[in-house]
Amino acid sequence: MIDRRKVVAQISGAIALSAAAVAGWFKRDALAQGEKTMAMTQQAMVDLFQKHVGAELAGDLETTMATMTDNPHLHNVPTPVGGVGREGVRAFYRDHLVGKFFPPDVKMVSVSRTVGTDQVVDELVISFTHTTVIDWMLPGIAPTGKFVEVAFAVIVGIKDGKISHEHIYWDQASVLVQIGLLNPKGLPVVGAESARKVLDPTLLARKI
C-alpha cells in the first residue's frame, strides 16, 4: 500500500531542491553578470586615466581638461602644488605641467594597478634625465643634468565618468639625493636604490 504522505513529502522535497538549484543558478548568473559589468566599468576607468596622462605628455591641454569633472582638484603631495576647481586646475596644467610634464627621455614602468568602483591607484617607477625645468616636482630648481629614478603612487578619483581628483605621492628625498641637493650621509634616506627595490624586491634591504 502506498503511503501518500511519504510520496507527497518526497515530491515536495524534490520541488524544493529544484527551486533552490534554479535560485542558486540565477544568483550565480547575476553575480557573473555583475562582475562582467564591473570589469567593463573598471576598464573604462583605466582607459580614461590613460587618455588623461597621454594628453598631459602630448601637451594637449584641451583633451586633458576634457577628461576631468567640472570641479576637480590636483594635489602633488611632497611639494605641494596643484589646483582646485576647473579654472585652478586648468591654470596649473597650462602654466606648469601639460607639455612640461617630464624631460624628453622619461620612462614610466608600471609596478601595480588597483581599480575600485570609483578610484584607480597606480604604482610606478619613473626615470628621466633632469634636463628641463619640472615646476610641479622641483619648483625653483634649475636643470641639473642628473639621472633620476623614483617610485610614484597616483590616486585617481572618478565621478560620473570623469576624473574628479588626483593625489600624487613620490619620494622627494630620494629625488633630492639624486640631483645632488641632499647629502644622505647620516640621514634615513637613499637615492635611486629606493625605486630599484620597488622594481626588484630581491635586492638587499638597508641594514639598520
Image (tube, rainbow, N blue to C red):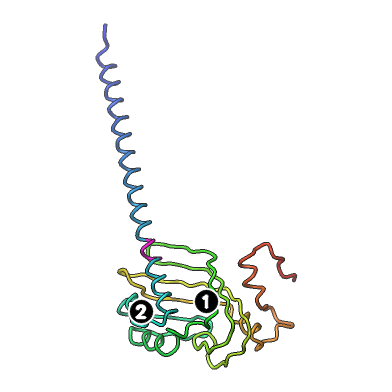
Would you say the residues marked 2 and 1 are in contact, meaning their CB atoms lie under 8 Å apart?
Answer: no
Q: Secondary structure at mark 1?
A: strand
Q: Earlier in the sequence, mark 2 or mark 1?
A: 2
User: In this orientation, which residue lies closer to the viewer: 201 or 100?
Assistant: 100
Q: Amino acid at mark 1?
A: Tyr
The magenta region covers 42-46
173 in the magenta segment: no
Q: Residue at x 25, y 19 (%)?
A: 8
Q: Secondary structure at mark 2?
A: strand
Q: Considering depth in this image, is 96 or 130 the residue closer to the camera?
A: 130
Q: Which is nearer the eye, 167 or 7?
A: 167
Residue drawn at 32 percent across, 34 percent down: 20
Q: Main secondary structure of the magenta part?
A: helix
The amino acid sitting under disc 2 is: Pro
- Asked if residue 44 is among those painted magenta in the image, a careful observer would answer yes
Residue 194 percent location from the top left of the image: 64, 73
Label annotation for residue 72: 2
Q: Is residue 14 left or right of residue 54?
A: left
Screen quadrant of the N terminus: top left
Q: Is residue 198 left or right of residue 80?
A: right
- Please state the horizontal and vertical placement of residue 87, each as a whole percent of the image: 33, 87
- Pick whichever, 78 or 11, lies toward us: 78
Q: Report, in whole angstroms, how far the alpha carbon at label 2 lies from the one at label 1.
A: 18 Å
Reading the image, the residue beneath label 1 is: 169
Q: Residues within 10 Å of mark 2 (few under 14, many from 20)?
A: many
Q: Residue at x 66, y 87 (%)?
A: 180
Q: Residue 98's x, y, as percent?
A: 42, 84
Residue lying furthest top = 1
Q: Left or right? Give the position of 207 relative to 109.
A: right
Q: In the image, is residue 8 above or below residue 81? A: above
The image quarter in which residue 6 lies: top left
Residue 91 position, x and y percent, is: 38, 89
